[in-house]
Image (cartoon, helix red, strand yellow):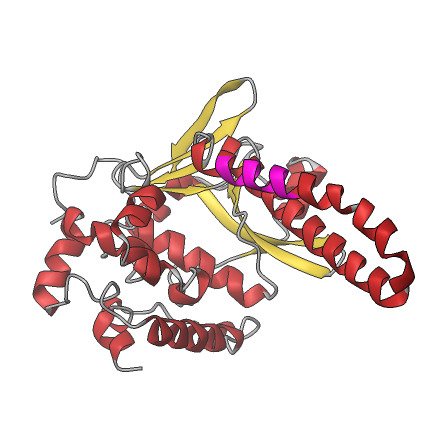
Amino acid sequence: MISDFYSDTAFTPAKWGSQSSPRDIGDFSKTEQLRREFPLPKGNYLNETMARTPSNIVEILKDEKELQESIGDGEWYEFGWATWANPSEKWAAIKSLLKFCIIILILTHVLLYLRYPEDLDKIISTLWLDAVLFVLFFFARYKVKSSENKNNIGFNRKTGMVSIPRKGQEPFIAPFYEFIPYFYRHHILQGVDYHLYLGHRTEEIGAVNPNAGKHPQEMYADWALIQRFMDVSKPLPDIPLFEPFRLQDPTTKAYDAMTGRPEHYWRDMDTKKATKLHDASYKRIRQFPVNDQSQWREVPVEATQWPEIQNL
């Protein structure tokens, strides 16, 4: 029996089977068709969620102040994907660009000095640009921390709803089970990135995961992560990101009590071990047979929780 904590609209896999046929992909716009090129299966076929979250979160768990800053003021049962409408995300992109420019400029000055040491005075005269970039970088870093974290794509475990912001309109809100998973290719200068895309089954709208991957297998892992987070019939994915909230989620709390999971399993873990587990999980992702559906299996809950991870 699922706890009364969850709304009637909360997601369970059984709700996938109670829908009519989706809209034909050919009826969508060209952009939507490209995003819906590669469909993904329903079910946790690649539950390697550890590899798709930063291992340094273990360090954040050890620092109460940093942990509180990372959690923010949002409810724990809301998981977000950042969008460009998020002020904090915009400043984070600007900060990264400034950091890149600073590195390039410093390297340029070093190379110029090595090549033309007699022109040291001229090189020094351009160092003001470095100072300007440094000031802008620290300002951007301040804005990342101080800007409001809003306008994200939201996944609500408690209600089972997905919220997608729209410019000049109210957010589009629909049940999780009305979205169909796909991944698509994004061509960049360094090659190709892959993104998970959840397209609404009838509407010309969807949710793009900003966390890109270099291999299609990573999209299967991302899809498993969001499925497991939204599925209230199963405990939360056992990764550092969700450990502070496990006792607040009824399904997860009951499961942890049954298995005897330590409350601070990840928080008490050595960072080097967490990194090792992260790397091992990524290796298993790369070995996943995306083209051989005969080997796809739904991963049982007990195979993805802390006892299994602990014994790797």
Q: Percent x, y for residue 76?
A: 27, 42
The answer to which of 24 and 224 lies nearer the viewer is 224
Q: Percent x, y for residue 262?
A: 14, 66
- Against 82, residue 292 (above or below) is below
Residue at the image point whose x is 34% and y is 42% from the top: 69
Among the 4 quarters of the image, the one containing residue 276: bottom left
Instruction: Tell me: 139 left or right of 179.
Output: right
- Against 294, residue 185 (above or below) is above
View extreme (bottom): residue: 311
The answer to which of 102 and 189 lies nearer the viewer is 102
The segment highlighted magenta reads 134-142
Among the 4 quarters of the image, the one containing residue 80: top left
Instruction: Tell me: 95 left or right of 223.
Output: right
Q: Percent x, y for residue 212?
A: 57, 55
Residue at the image point whose x is 40% and y is 32% from the top: 174
Residue 104 on the magenta span: no
Residue at the image point whose x is 25% and y is 68% from the top: 305
- Against 15, residue 142 (above or below) is above
Q: Percent x, y for residue 259?
A: 12, 69
